[in-house]
Amino acid sequence: MHNLSKSKLIAFRQCPKRLWLEIHRPELREDSPTTQASFQAGHQVGEVARRIYDPEGRGALIDAQTEGYAAAFARTERLLSEAKAPIFEAGLHTEGALAFADVMLPVRVKGRRAWRMVEVKSSTSVKDYHHDDVAVQTFIAQAAGVNLHSVAVACIDSAWVYPGGGDYRGLLMETDLTEEAMGRADEVRQWLAEAQAIAAKRREPTVAMGAHCREPFECGFCNYCSRDLPQPEYPVNWLPHLSGRQRTQLEALGVDDLRQVPDALLNGRQRLVKAQTLTNKVYFDAKGAAADLKPHGLPARFLDFETVMFAVPIWAGTRPYQQIPFQFSLHLFTAAGRVTHEEFLDLSGDDPTGPFAKALIQACGQRGPIYVYNVGFERARISELAERYPGLAPELQAINGRLVDLLPIARERYYHPAQQGSWSIKAVLPNAVPEMNYANLEGVQDGSMAMDAYAEAIRPDTPAERKAEIRQQLLAYCGMDTLALVRLWEFFRGGSKG
């Protein structure tokens, strides 16, 4: 019999094959950057939760990796029997299953010692799979002999504003799941038996790939499971914005290649993607693109932001997962045809938003269009800055009024088969302007990498040499973003087919 952790039981709930691979072929797992970022956020929230639930610092933290599992279970058992202070990462086990409870809080109920268990999540709401997670945790705790009084999930309150000074009271909000979790023991017992049967198999189970490969988590074994699957020459996933209904219809028809997709099921843009892909021809309405840009004169500016967000805010006045701008690049195309460049980047570790807002106002001048790609992003960040800094609000909102979005022009006027259904700047640019290539950049090549690089740069223990290297990489990346906008604007404005 395997000692299955709670995470492995949740893996089983997602896919029996995933459980088997987690146990027998863990080396095949490839976690995406998104998954790794989620793990990191979970660690950050867990650390803060210990300060929230134990402000006096009297609690005990169990570290099974350092202590060893046997010692961790033994120390947990002793601390549970004493019931004097909070226990974090309490080691709980029963036959064939084990778990580590995020927070165990001692309470007295009718004169008896009991415990309140809280599972801490980095999400901003209770998800469906959290109910299974807590049911498993409750089953193991009660099977281990813990006198549970109540069970809750604590999620992040995304509307909470950090007051500063290390005061994180209010960051987490609890949802009580006691009755539900305690009522699912028979269900969990069945899961455990079925999971043990899967774990005992000598060969991996056969499970077809499907929606469960992405829900509720992105599975790290997707590349392994898809290695031998026949790949359609023109996957239906290249169709932009496929609705759930369309996916269901295509699956019912057994269709996975664009050549088999009935036009009647598609909207206009999807039909365009299908047609250009199958004929391998570029669609470019050059006259339409030039006409779209004609009302906007010179000088023209081209703007791009880089932002960072933290599950646990580090600056007063900011919220969990708020996108905080720390960098911008701005290219200026003058009436005389000259191109100049301005940029801002704050790696001090202090809240960058005030200096950012002032530098942005200075760089944007008083007149002329300001081109961006996907205007909703920059417009929302500027509006947030205006809200935080009322004294700068008129100038910031004036900038918002001058923003012009190149994305709708790209969507309506241009499509290259190599875009594979995407109009992201990185999909459009290599085809419309081949000389622009993000792959040539060192280190930082996309927004997610920029976030990670920034977070590393502002850590106090980051060496000065590494910080300088990150600075250069961030400046090169963000600068290329706005130079790309200039070149794309020239392409659309000039009517060249590239």
Image: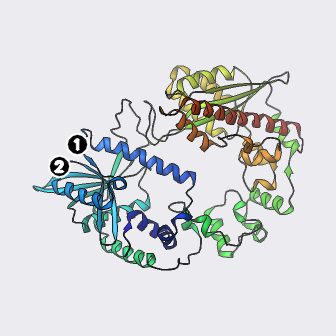
Residue lying furthest left: 111
Q: In screen coordinates, is 244 left or right of 427?
A: left
Q: Check the picture and name the quadrant holding the N terminus.
A: bottom left
User: Can you say whether 261 is above or below 36 in the image?
Assistant: below
Residue 467 drawn at (x, y percent): 57, 31
User: Looking at the picture, which amino acid does disc 2 mark?
Assistant: Lys
User: Can you say whether 336 is above or below 166 in the image?
Assistant: above
Residue 109 drawn at (x, y percent): 14, 55
Q: Check the picture and name the quadrant holding the C terminus.
A: top right
Residue at 25% over, 66% down: 144
Residue 295 in sight from this viewpoint:
yes
Q: In screen coordinates, is 154 left or right of 278?
A: left
Q: Residues within 10 Å of mark 1 (few under 14, many from 20)?
A: few
Quadrant of the image occupied by residue 168: top left
Real-space CA distance between mark 1 and mark 2, rounded to the nearest whole angstrom: 9 Å
User: Looking at the picture, which amino acid does disc 1 mark?
Assistant: Arg
Residue at 60% over, 25% down: 396
Pointer 1 residue: 58
Q: Residues within 10 Å of mark 2 (few under 14, many from 20)?
A: some
Q: In screen coordinates, is 274 left or right of 15?
A: right
Pointer 2 residue: 84
Residue 400 drawn at (x, y percent): 64, 30
- Secondary structure category for the residue under label 2: loop
Q: Nearer the viewer, residue 59 or 331?
A: 59
